[in-house]
Structures are given as C-alpha cells and as structure tokens.
Image: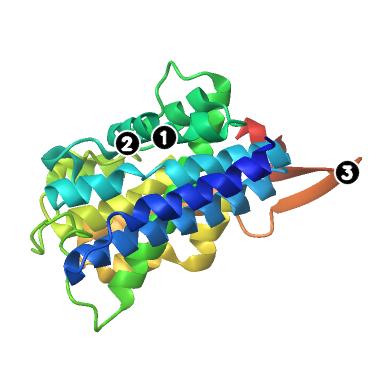
Amino acid sequence: MDMQTALIRLKAWFDDYVEQFASNDPRIQENMDMKEGHTRRVCAAILDIGASLNLSTEELCTAEATAWLHDIGRFEQYTRYGTFMDHRSEDHAALGVRVVRETRILERIGAFDQELILRVVGAHNRAAIPPEADERTRFFLKLLRDADKVDIWHVVTAYYQDPEQRRNHALELDLPDSPDISKPVYEALMKGELVKMADLKTVNDFKLLQMGWIYDVNFPRTFQIVREKGYLEIIRDALSVRSAPSTDVYARARAYLDRRCPDNRAVEVRNKGIRVVVVKKAGVERKVDDI
C-alpha cells in the first residue's frame, strides 16, 4: 500500500476512534471537539511548514501521520480523568503510544515507518527533544512540535480575544486567574528558556509560558506565521496585569522573533527544481538546515 492510501485509511480510523468519545454532556463534548479540531489544524500546519522545506510526498505523508496521532491519547485522558493536565492524570503522549499499539492501526494499514511515528508521538510533548534521538526522528519531532505550537497559539489567542467566551478551565489547566506572575516563570523566560509546567501557579504564568514557546520554534515558516498572526501581542494584551516583568518578557520574546524572522531578509531561490530557503542574517547566508 502506498503512503497516500495509507494516510486516507489513517484519517478514517481517526474519525471512527474519536466518535467513540462523543458525549451528551456539553462540557465533555466541548473538550472532545476542541482536541479533534486541534488535531486537524495541526495536520494543516505541518503540511504548510513541510511544504516550505520542499519535502517529498513521502516525507509530507509521514509528517501528517504524526500529526493525526500526536494527541490521540487526549480523548481517553479527558474521559478517564476529566483533565488535560498530564501531572494530574498521565502523560498523554505515552497514553497515545499505547492507544496506537493496542489498536495496531499502523500495523494494519502498513506503509508507514511505525517505530519512527511512535517515537515522534511519544516525545512530542517533552520539554526538549531527547538527546538520544536519531537525526530523522529529530527532524520530524521539530516539524510536529512547531505545528503543534502554531495551532495551540491559534486556539488560545482566539479564546483570549473572544469577549463573550466563558472560562474554559480545561484550556486554562484549572489554574487560578490571579494577577500574579511567579518568579521562576519570569526568570526562565528572561534567560530565553522554556517554563516548567511545575512552576505554573496562575493563568498569567500559563500565558507567559505560551509566549515563551517562541524559544522552541525551529523553522523559518513557523516564525513567519507567529509574526503574521501577532500571537505574541495577543498574549501580551490578554494578561490580567501589565507589569514591568510582563513587559520585559514580551520585549525579549519579540526581539528574539525579529532576529529569527527579520523583515525582507527571507528569500527563496530555485535551483534545478529544488527550492532552498536561504536566510540572510548579518551579511551571512545560511540554509534552513543550518539554522
């Protein structure tokens, strides 16, 4: 079976699997719909980013397969525990790997590199890419992590901008909506580091964590999307308090984005039908693979 046919079967399986979690409880169904919609948009985002890198059809199919499966554990997680917080339930990525193995979906449809996809799904939510990951795994992990962030930014910024939106405690990780910003969160972001989930004490902390994801983005197209959509600015404006620490965090994140995605410096060149994205920075040209 070729990969495109296998991908069609994987999508059909996804639809059938998610349908099992349909609920008459509006709160539960809202969260099921949220995760289903998220998965579909991550698939679109990973194809967008992958196309900017001139990936082959097979590589795009593999990338899309990881996107369809990356949050498959979320449905059982919320049904069983009533939360999307891994530390209050279980690691949704590990749960997703278990679902894929128990249903044997990748074995049944064939075509895909099953172990590669399972490695990517199992590690997509880690604080950092595992150092022992081989080059191919690292590449697909970076693609998935970028696409995942692009859509989470989309979801949370739409939520923050809707004045009629009632609070979604699952989306806010059940954190209190107090004006405080925790010191460990501020210190990590001012170092250009990712915030640890264990350090989150308030919704403002979680919003700043989302802003700090910019330090874990890999590809030029992803930076471009963040700038075009104004995600950092929307998160900044959604903070319940504007303070010197929050202003500092935003300024550093925005400066980093501008350095990685400077205006009018990203160009595309075509050579023998192969597209290579070149970024000009400080007078030096570097290919995407070097960034």
Could you tell me residue 253's position as x and y percent? 39, 52
Identity, as a three-letter code, of the amino acid under mark 1: Val
Identity, as a three-letter code, of the amino acid under mark 3: Gly
Q: Is residue 260 visible?
A: yes
Q: Nearer the viewer, mark 1 or mark 3?
A: 1
According to the image, label 1 marks what residue? 121
Disc 3: CA contacts within 10 A as few (<14), some (14-19) or many (>=20) = few
Disc 2: CA contacts within 10 A as few (<14), some (14-19) or many (>=20) = many
- Name the image quarter holding the C terminus: top right
Label ID, residue 273: 3
**Left or right of residue 95: residue 218:** right
In the displayed structure, 36 sits above or below 91; it is below
Distance between the alpha carbons at the discs numbered 3 and 2:
38 Å
Which residue appears at 35% of the width and 40% of the height? 192
Which residue appears at 91% of the width and 40% of the height? 272
Residue at the limit of the structure toward the top, as seen here: 132
Sequence-wise first label, 3 or 2: 2
**Left or right of residue 159: residue 271:** right
Q: Are marks 1 and 2 in contact (CB under 8 Å)?
A: yes
* Front residue (pair 237, 53): 53
Label ID, residue 189: none
Which structural element holds mark 3?
loop
Distance between the alpha carbons at the discs numbered 1 and 2:
6 Å
* Front residue (pair 236, 36): 36
Could you tell me residue 276's position as x and y percent? 76, 42
According to the image, label 2 marks what residue? 93
Disc 1: CA contacts within 10 A as few (<14), some (14-19) or many (>=20) = many
Identity, as a three-letter code, of the amino acid under mark 2: Ala
